[in-house]
């Protein structure tokens, strides 16, 4: 059903479009050791003409909504742990809760910390899927809360009204008639699953990559070669993108494609926690 795979490395920053990258994989039509070929790799800023968060995310939503037979693997948490959400609130209610916070993503993170502390246990509660996939952070950590907030509110939120859009694991009932499917990705977790280096490939300060980071990226690309064919132009883009966002978009797509094909969807749909707080497809 899904012939095109998109991977999105996400950002909730004010200039989000600059750091959000979109990778598009198409099924390989020629005989190749790789199942997919990388057909597109572009920053959202280039796609929509601005880096400003609001119009950039609106453009991403529109592109998702216009896609057909597509799987979208997006690198941001799709939900909050049930422990920090009021009893009885379903996942759609989480999205509504985020809307009530205006632009105060940081304040939402503090409220999650307050609720976790009130329970008497650890302040940073991980969802079950975060523990299983060994994610670097919980989904309301100060380093990730802006991704969680703007991803859930400004990307998933507008797409809820599209009946042909299935956001998993919350919308398995929509799946039979869905034209597009959205799943939560985590490039770091995908690299761990593949046994590839998951550190020392990002260089946020810019400039030419250090030798260590060059070697790490080459090792990752070599490890992905049996999954996706990456042409010389796209390989140069990946090697020149200091923050590693372009590479993460490709990894998100690869992980999403594998998980979509390999997952026990019936079990996930019936799980006591996944449909309430989300699940990673890595």
Image: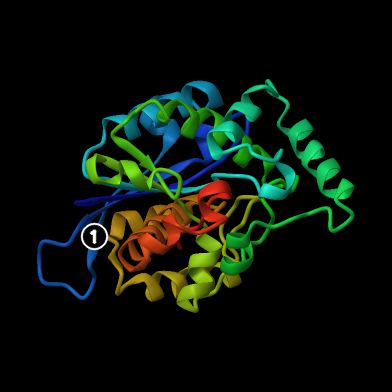
Q: Where residue 113 sits in the image (x, y, percent)?
A: 82, 44
Q: Is residue 52 above or below residue 235?
A: above
Q: Is residue 15 left or right of residue 185?
A: right
Q: Is residue 128 above or below residue 61?
A: below
- Identified at 36% across, 47% down, the residue is 172
Most distant residue in the front direction? 88
Placement of the C terminus among the 4 image quadrants: bottom left
Residue placed most toward the observer, 115 or 235: 115
- Identified at 60% across, 72% down, the residue is 212
- Give the SS element for disc 1: strand
- Identified at 50% across, 69% down, the residue is 191
Q: Where residue 260 sits in the image (x, y, percent)?
A: 34, 60
- Identified at 77% across, 41% down, the residue is 112
Q: Where residue 68 sits in the image (x, y, percent)?
A: 22, 39
Residue 77 visible in the snapshot: no
The count of marks equals 1
Q: Is residue 112 above or below residue 238?
A: above
Applied colour scheme: rainbow
């Amino acid at each position: 059903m899904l012939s095109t795979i998109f991977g999105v490395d996400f950002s909730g920053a004010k200039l989000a479009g600059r750091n959000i990258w979109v990778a598009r994989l198409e099924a390989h039509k020629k005989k190749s050791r790789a199942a997919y070929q990388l057909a597109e790799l572009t920053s959202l800023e280039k796609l929509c003409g601005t880096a400003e968060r609001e119009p950039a995310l609106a453009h991403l939503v529109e592109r998702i909504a216009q896609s057909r037979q597509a799987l979208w693997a997006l690198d941001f948490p799709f939900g909050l742990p049930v422990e920090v959400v009021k009893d009885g609130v379903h996942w759609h209610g989480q999205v509504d809760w985020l809307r009530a916070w205006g632009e105060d993503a940081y304040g939402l993170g503090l409220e999650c910390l307050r609720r976790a502390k009130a329970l008497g246990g650890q302040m940073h509660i991980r969802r079950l899927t975060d523990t299983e996939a060994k994610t670097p952070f919980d989904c309301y950590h100060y380093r990730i809360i802006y991704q969680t907030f703007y991803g859930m509110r400004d990307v998933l939120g507008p797409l809820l009204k599209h009946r042909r859009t299935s956001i998993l694991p919350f919308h398995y009932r929509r799946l039979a008639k869905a034209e597009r499917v959205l799943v939560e990705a985590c490039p770091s977790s995908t690299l761990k699953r593949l046994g590839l280096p998951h550190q020392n490939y990002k260089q946020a300060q810019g400039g030419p990559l250090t030798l260590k980071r060059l070697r790490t990226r080459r090792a990752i690309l070599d490890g992905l070669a049996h999954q996706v064919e990456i042409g010389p132009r796209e390989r140069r883009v990946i090697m020149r993108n200091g923050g590693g966002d372009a590479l993460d978009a490709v990894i998100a797509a690869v992980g999403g494609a594998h998980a979509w094909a390999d997952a026990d969807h019936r079990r996930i749909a019936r799980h006591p926690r996944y449909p309430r707080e989300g699940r990673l497809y890595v």
